[in-house]
Structures are given as C-alpha cells and as structure tokens.
C-alpha cells in the first residue's frame, strides 16, 4: 500500500494547502493509496496524530512506500528524520518527495536526502534565531517582549524614540493586590504559604485560578517588572552574573525592569538571562522589593533536615533522666516517644509517657505567651535605625558581590560607595544595634508552617526535658 502524508502548520495565503499536496502526490501514484494528513501541526517534532498512525501502519507492514509533497512536510529535524529513515529501512519502505525528485533506493538519492534535510534544519534554526534576536531586541528597547501581562498590568502601546509603536505595560486595578503581596510577605513571621492562604480566605482570585499557592506568590515577588529599579537593584542582578543592557547610572529608581532567559545558564549560551530597563514605571519601592528578595534567598538556604518527619519539636526533646535526645516513632495514628539513651545505649530507665500532640499544644501555647511579652517593634524607638542598618548591610553585600562578578564596576566606585556606606553604618550603630527579637511579638505561632514553627521554637527554646508525663521547658530568653 502506498501512503501519502500531508501536513500544514498554518493556513496562510502563500502556503501549499493539504489538498494541493495530496493532489500532487496522487498524480505520480499508479494505483490506490491511503492519505494521512495533519492540519495545524509543526514539523519540528513527530508528535502528530496522523503521522503517528502512519508509523504504526509501517510497523505492521501495511505500507510499502511513503509519498510527500516536500521533505519538510515529513520532518524538519535531522535527528528525527534519521530515526524515521532507520524505521523505513527496517521495514523496507521506500520514500519519495514529489518536488525534490530523489530516489532513496540509490546512494546518490540518500546523499541528496541528507543534504536537503541539512538545509531544512538550517532554515528552521535560522528562523528561530531571528525570532529570538527580535525578542531580545524588544527587551533591550524596554518594550514588553510578549505573552500575557503580569498581574496588575495591562498591555498598551507607546512610542519609542524613533516614533515607532512599541508594546508597554500599564498598571490596572489589580496592582493593589500586587502591592499587598509584597507588603504582607515583608512582615515579620510571614511566609509564602501564609500570604497565599490569607488571599484565598478573603476570596481574592489568583492568576487564572480561584485560589493562591506559594509558587504563584513567589513568582510575583521575584519579578522585577514591578520594581522601581535603582542602583541597588542593578547591583542585585549584577552580583548574579546576569547580562544587563544599561549601565548602572541609568537605574534611577523610576522605571521597572524586564528579565528574560534562564538565570542559571552561562554567559553567551543560548537563552542566557538578560535584564533591561522597561519603558513603563515601577510601582514597588526598591527597598521593599530587595527586602523580599533577601527573605526569599534566606528561605532557600534553610533545608528541612532538622524539621523532623513527625513534629516541629524534633531536636528539642531531651530525656529528663539522662539528657539524651528523645526520638519520635509512629505506629498507625499513634506516636511514641523514646529515650535514645535507653534504646541505643541501654543506660537509662526513664519512661516517657507524654502525648506528642498534647505536648505540641502545650509548648505552642507557652511560646505564644512568650511572644506576646516581647517588646513590639512599634514601641521600640530605635527600630527605624535598626532597619536602616539592615538595609545598609544589604547594600554593601550587593556592591561587593556585583564587583566580584563584573568588571564594569570600577574599584574607585567600589571604594567610594563602601566608604560612604560604612560611615553611615557606624553612625547608626552608635545609636543602637538591633537585638533581632522585637519582630517576634507579632507572630501568630499557630498559623506558621511546620518548618517555621521549628525555626521560632529553636530561637526561643534551649531544650525540653521529658520525664514520665511531665515536661519542663528551658528557655534561651
């Protein structure tokens, strides 16, 4: 049986229709044939319904020859065609392209086939490169590169320096949700999951869905399309080795940024990350945006190795008899507490009879009571100076990191900025150094995640001694 395969990705005026492809092939076939046609599918891969059905018929020995109008209707990839050609040869199936006129049963025909496939792939890669170059060019000019607008923005048109129309972003009513996400996450004790739960509980719709999750919140917080990009934002990205289109002097704190490409790809590699100032104004102050980046970075550095599988108390529980760690095991829905001095070393006879969940509730209540007695940040007259100290430390770190990863920042500028920031920091440090605990007062302990409860408990509690059904909390404060 002869098979005619026809494909058309886009129905355009100057393209050859599927019907025309079939007609050309039918003229050359002497006898009957079966048609396989894919409309609206690209030739860059083989994941096409009718194409896959034809391959299955080839494997079953139903096809003796495949006819196509042109080779690129069959495949645009050398790798894909090489595998397909091996399949055709394995089942003794001939292949003929009507317009390119070659016979695969001869060496010259097979050579011609390889040459044509090489140029077909070259054409596809050239088109892809032109599309990518145009994409990066739009970003370098500050235009919106394409795709749906981020939350809080609508796509509009503006004029570039040459008077040409260019897509841009304009803030809409949803920008208030974005502002709230940044401010909520920056609050002490706030987490991605906590912000997501709060928005969902209040009935605020998410991005293309009703609810929110940590991933959606994280993507918004990381996106520089919202930030009023100043020199500190420039240093933040320069420290990561990201290619930045404009010099540091252009980052004046007015316009936002576009970031495209993959951050973890080496410089010069296809798809490397690039940052450019946008042609729309930023809406999130740089200190707020950078504060969120620092908090996100700190969260990534905390692993879950010490959290424990069963309880946030893991690592804090100690035997009141021997002082060794208390381990938690589970059988069904029941949890058991074991002294490792008894189970591992046989040196302790203490029997621990505390109920794990009751113990968690009791310790959690004690922690909440302890937090309520901490001085509130609003009552601390030095909290403003403390925040300035933290901000200056972040600026110095970004400056040094950017200099280490880029030769565009001169040593003179580095020394001048560090000297200025150092003087400012010393002046603030003489007023008061932040204790680091004033932010604990506003934490609602019961609403924290397991990892967050572990972090707070470790900050406040030295250890919890267990003896029988009694527990004694030894505080650090």
Image (spheres, rainbow, N blue to C red):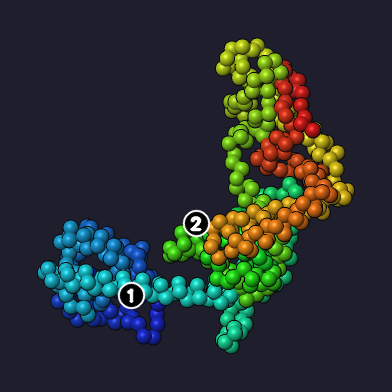
User: Could you give the CA–CA distance between mark 2 and mark 1, rounded to whole angstroms?
Assistant: 29 Å
Report the residue at 40% width, 77% height from top. 10
Q: Measuring from the top left, give residue 267's x and y in whole percent.
A: 46, 62
Q: Residues within 10 Å of mark 1 (few under 14, many from 20)?
A: few
Quarter of the image for the N terminus: give it: bottom left
Q: Are marks 2 and 1 in contact (CB under 8 Å)?
A: no
* Residue closer to the observer: 129 or 155: 129
Question: How far from the left and from the top, in percent, is residue 219?
Answer: 61, 59
Which quarter of the image is occupied by the C terminus?
A: top right
Residue 408 is left or right of residue 172, and the answer is left
Q: Nearer the viewer, residue 297 or 214?
A: 297
Instruction: Indicate the secondary structure of the residue bearing disc 2.
Output: loop
Name above or below for residue 400 compared with residue 135. above
Q: Nearer the viewer, residue 45 or 91?
A: 45
Per the image, the residue denoted by label 2 is 264
Q: Would you say residue 4 is visible in this rendering?
A: no
Using residue 326 as the reference point, say whether residue 88 is left or right of it: left
Among the 4 quarters of the image, the one containing residue 46: bottom left
Count of number-bearing discs: 2
Among the two numbered marks 2 and 1 on one chain, the one whose residue lies closer to the N terminus: 1
Q: Which mark is residue 390?
A: none
Res 123 label: 1
Give the residue at x 62% y 24%. Answer: 327
From the viewer's perspective, is the residue at label 2 or at label 1 nearer?
Answer: 2
What's the residue at 57%, 61% (across, down)?
Answer: 238
For residue 360, above or below residue 284: above
Q: Pointer 2: residues within 10 angstroms few (<14), some, or many (20+)?
A: few
Q: Position of residue 121 (x, y in %)?
A: 31, 70
Residue 393 appears anywhere in the view: yes
When the figure is inspected, residue 397 is found, relative to residue 73, above or below; the finding is above
Residue 206 placement (x, y as % from top left): 65, 60
Could you tell me which secondary element the residue under label 1 belongs to? helix
């Amino acid at each position: 049986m002869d098979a005619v395969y026809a494909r058309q990705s886009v129905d355009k005026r100057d393209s050859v229709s599927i019907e025309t492809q079939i007609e050309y092939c039918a003229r050359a076939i002497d006898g009957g044939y079966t048609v396989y046609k894919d409309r609206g599918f690209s030739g860059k891969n083989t994941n096409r319904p009718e194409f896959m059905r034809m391959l299955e018929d080839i494997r079953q020995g139903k096809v003796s020859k495949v006819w196509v109008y042109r080779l690129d209707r069959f495949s645009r990839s050398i790798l894909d065609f090489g595998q397909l050609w091996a399949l055709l040869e394995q089942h003794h199936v001939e292949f003929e392209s009507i317009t390119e006129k070659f016979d695969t049963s001869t060496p010259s025909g097979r050579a011609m086939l390889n040459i044509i496939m090489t140029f077909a792939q070259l054409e596809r890669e050239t088109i892809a490169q032109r599309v990518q170059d145009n994409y990066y060019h739009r970003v370098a000019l500050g235009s919106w590169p394409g795709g749906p607008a981020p939350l809080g923005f609508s796509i509009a048109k503006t004029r570039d320096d040459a008077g040409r129309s260019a897509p841009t972003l304009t803030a809409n009513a949803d920008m208030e949700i974005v502002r709230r996400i940044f401010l909520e996450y920056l609050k002490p004790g706030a987490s991605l999951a906590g912000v997501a739960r709060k928005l969902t509980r209040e009935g605020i719709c998410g991005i293309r869905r009703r609810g929110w999750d940590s991933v959606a919140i994280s993507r918004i917080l990381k996106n520089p399309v919202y930030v009023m990009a100043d020199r500190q934002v420039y240093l933040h990205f320069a420290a990561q080795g990201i290619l930045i289109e404009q010099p540091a002097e252009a980052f004046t704190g007015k316009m936002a940024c576009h970031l495209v490409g993959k951050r973890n790809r080496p410089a010069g590699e296809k798809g490397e990350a690039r940052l450019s100032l946008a042609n729309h104004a930023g809406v999130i102050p740089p200190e707020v945006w950078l504060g969120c980046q620092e908090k996100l970075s700190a969260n990534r550095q905390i692993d879950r190795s010490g959290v424990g599988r069963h309880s946030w108390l893991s690592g804090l529980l100690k035997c009141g008899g021997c002082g060794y760690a208390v381990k938690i095991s589970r059988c069904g829905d029941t949890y058991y507490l074991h002294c490792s001095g008894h189970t591992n070393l046989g040196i302790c006879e203490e029997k621990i009879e505390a109920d794990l969940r009751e113990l968690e509730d009791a310790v959690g209540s004690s922690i909440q009571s302890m937090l309520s007695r901490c001085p509130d940040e609003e009552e601390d007259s030095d909290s403003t100076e403390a925040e300035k100290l933290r901000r200056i430390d972040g600026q110095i770190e970004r400056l040094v990191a950017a200099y280490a990863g880029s030769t565009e920042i001169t040593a003179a500028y580095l020394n001048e900025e560090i000297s200025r920031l150092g003087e400012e920091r010393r002046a603030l440090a003489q007023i008061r150094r932040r204790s680091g605990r004033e932010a604990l007062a506003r934490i609602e302990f019961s609403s924290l995640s397991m990892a967050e409860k572990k972090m707070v408990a470790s900050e406040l509690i030295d250890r919890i001694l267990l003896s029988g059904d009694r527990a004694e909390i030894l505080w650090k404060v």
